């Protein structure tokens, strides 16, 4: 098992530390997730004109959750396997970044 590591990411100009399992793929996933969140937050902020970061974060979470649910529905209707491990990993990433899980940011 790899040693846990901390990865620094930047979202909307603010730095966050996220705990990873230490594997290269995990670190790459954290960085990709941070890029997705940053891009989505910027797009929503620019489109809505909202300056309240918490409001933008909630809208971003809803946007990402909607995409995830749509993908899950598509996989179900196609008869394909659900990506439960990937979904679980995304949930853990969000918990880690928000301090809701066992490891805080």
Image: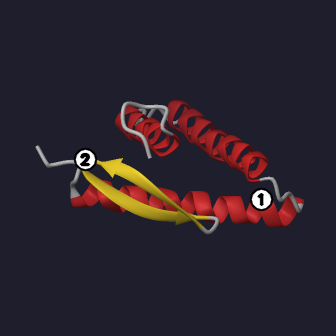
In the figure, 97 relative to 11: above or below? above
Query: Which numbered tag is attached to residue 34?
Result: none
> In the image, 27: left or right of 74?
left
Q: Quadrant of the N terminus?
A: top left
Secondary-structure class at tag 2 = loop
In the rendered structure, are the residues bearing label 1 and label 2 in contact, judged by CB atoms less than 8 Å apart? Answer: no
Which residue is depicted at the point 46% across and 63% down?
9
Of the residues under marks 1 and 2, which one precedes in the sequence? 2
Q: Residue furthest left?
A: 1
Q: Which residue is mark 2?
A: 21
Q: CA distance from mark 1 to mark 2?
A: 30 Å
Q: Which residue is mark 1?
A: 44
Image coords of residue 70 (percent x, y):
63, 39
Local crowd at mark 2 within 10 Å, few (<14), some, or many (≥20)?
Answer: some
> In the image, 81: left or right of 53?
left
Local crowd at mark 1 within 10 Å, few (<14), some, or many (≥20)?
Answer: some
Closer to the camera in the image, 56 or 65: 56
Which residue is depicted at the point 88% across and 62% down?
49
Closer to the camera in the image, 5 or 30: 5
Image coords of residue 83 (percent x, y):
40, 37
In the figure, 43 relative to 53: above or below? below
In the figure, 88 relative to 93: above or below? above
Image coords of residue 71 (percent x, y):
56, 42
Image coords of residue 73 (percent x, y):
59, 33
Please tell me how many numbered marks the rendered image carries.
2
Which residue is depicted at the point 40% across and 34% down?
88
Closer to the camera in the image, 13 or 67: 13
């Amino acid at each position: 098992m790899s040693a846990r590591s901390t990865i620094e990411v930047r979202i909307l100009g603010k730095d966050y530390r996220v705990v990873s399992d230490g594997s290269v793929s995990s670190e790459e996933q954290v960085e990709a997730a941070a890029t997705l969140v940053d891009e989505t937050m910027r797009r929503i902020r620019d489109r809505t004109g909202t300056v309240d970061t918490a409001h933008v974060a909630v809208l971003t979470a809803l946007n990402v959750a909607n995409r995830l649910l749509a993908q899950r529905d598509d996989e179900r209707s196609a008869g394909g396997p659900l990506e439960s491990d990937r979904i679980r990993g995304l949930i853990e990433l969000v918990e880690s970044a928000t301090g809701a899980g066992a490891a805080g940011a």
